[in-house]
Image: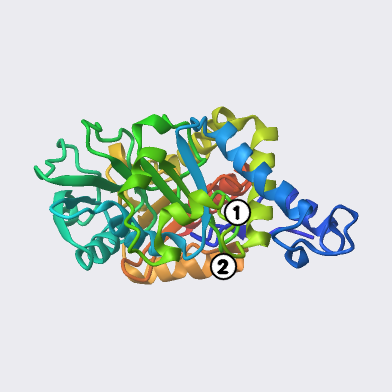
Amino acid sequence: MNRALNFNAGPAALPEAVLAEAEKNWLNFNHSGMAVMELSHRSKEYETIHEQAILLLRDLLSIPDSYEILFLQGGASLQFSMVPMNLLTEGKAGNYILTGVWAEKALKEAEKVGETFISASSKTQQYKSIPTVNAKTSENAAYLHITSNNTIYGTQWQHFPANEGIPLVADMSSDLLSRKLTIENFDLIYAGAQKNLGPSGVTVVIIQKELLSRSSNHLPTMLNYNTYATHNSLYNTPPTLAIYLLKLVLEWAKELGGLTVIEKRNEEKAKILYDAIDCSEGFYLGHAEKESRSKMNVTFNLPDEEIARSFLHQAKKEGFIGLNGHRSVGGCRASIYNAMPVEHVFQLAAFMKKFRRYN
């Protein structure tokens, strides 16, 4: 079977080897006579899956023992609320750097919880870049929140803000596991899995253990980070199938060579598409400024809407999936997460060059 040329922004393509392994064990996992989603989350079979997923994440990302790894549900959107609910103590302000729609949504949820402060923003520049100035934090900053990669606008942090004693919180839903990180530079990282980590349904939270003391006992049980830390993310039934697939993706990443190899592959894929844009003599117009370009989401437009519609129509006929830009900005977007084969990116670049010749 030919695999789709899947450039969807998320849920995104999964590695073919992962899907094949899951299919092999679909009806009978580890001779249990049951599928993974039928296993009790208290069973030894599932406990092994759960622990392996945590250990693989800790290994691949070099996460120190001073951090807890949590598996939650609700996606990054729930974290927009949980972060301020757990970290925004009385008399403090949640500080936010706005680089796109998802950062705006995170700020909006924090405003419902307590005081907020906008440390920097590139909104007036149509979110074409990451703010280059040092973020100005409020004197009573509880934390500084960033969105590491902006799927809608195709921008990405290349260098992160200095911590300077203020906890750094990062929504890394669309680029966690795509490049090497120094985890100690962050105090809390959260990521919906459906870009690079696995399928939708599980959210990974990596949190400095010292931060857990901020969570009030008056919080609803399921909105308190301590609930998950204390019970190893097994207080209630976790998304077992999603965690199993997450584990398979992490095994695939490790076998591939880890983040060193993955980062190099992602740089290669991004270069192929950005070269196609930059060498088009203005036919393809990249949205993001060069120094802020994302290696996960390549956003671009064409000379006018009629040509853009023709491009998307022809691309669909050629088998390319998910190249429409986000509904809020239009244009085109190619999402090239970890599982995207280099060969598919080459095919897209070739199509872009061919389309330009005929138009």
Mark 1 residue element = loop
Q: Which residue is mark 1?
A: 198
Of the two numbered discs 1 and 2 in the rendering, the one whose residue sits closer to the viewer: 1
Q: The N terminus lies in which quarter of the figure?
A: bottom right
- In which quadrant of the rendered view does residue 302 lie? bottom left
Q: Residue at x 32, y 40 (%)?
A: 157
Q: Which residue is mark 2?
A: 316
Helix, strand or loop at disc 2? helix
Residue 302 is at least partly visible in this image = no
Give x and y (percent) for residue 133: 15, 37
The residue lying furthest to the front in this view is 217
Q: Quadrant of residue 293?
A: top left
Circles 1, 2 touching at the beta carbon (< 8 Å): no
Q: CA distance from mark 1 to mark 2?
A: 25 Å
In this rendering, the answer to whether 134 lies above or below 96 is above
Residue 102 percent location from the top left of the image: 32, 60
Q: Residue at x 42, y 43 (%)?
A: 207
x 55%, y 59%: residue: 202
Relative to 168, say whether 76 is above or below. Answer: below
- Percent x, y of residue 100: 28, 57
Colouring rule applied to residues: rainbow
Q: Is residue 45 visible?
A: yes
Is 254 positioned to the left or the right of 229 in the image? right
Query: x, y percentage for residue 65?
Result: 50, 31
Which amino acid does the dot numbered 2 rest on?
Answer: Lys
In the image, what residue occupies the spot 46% across and 62% down? 75
Assess disc 1: are there few (<14), some (14-19) or many (≥20) residues with their C-alpha within 10 Å of its C-alpha: many
Front residue of 286 and 92: 92
Left or right? Give the position of 96 relative to 248: left
Instruction: Please tell me which of labels 1 and 2 falls first in the chain.
Output: 1
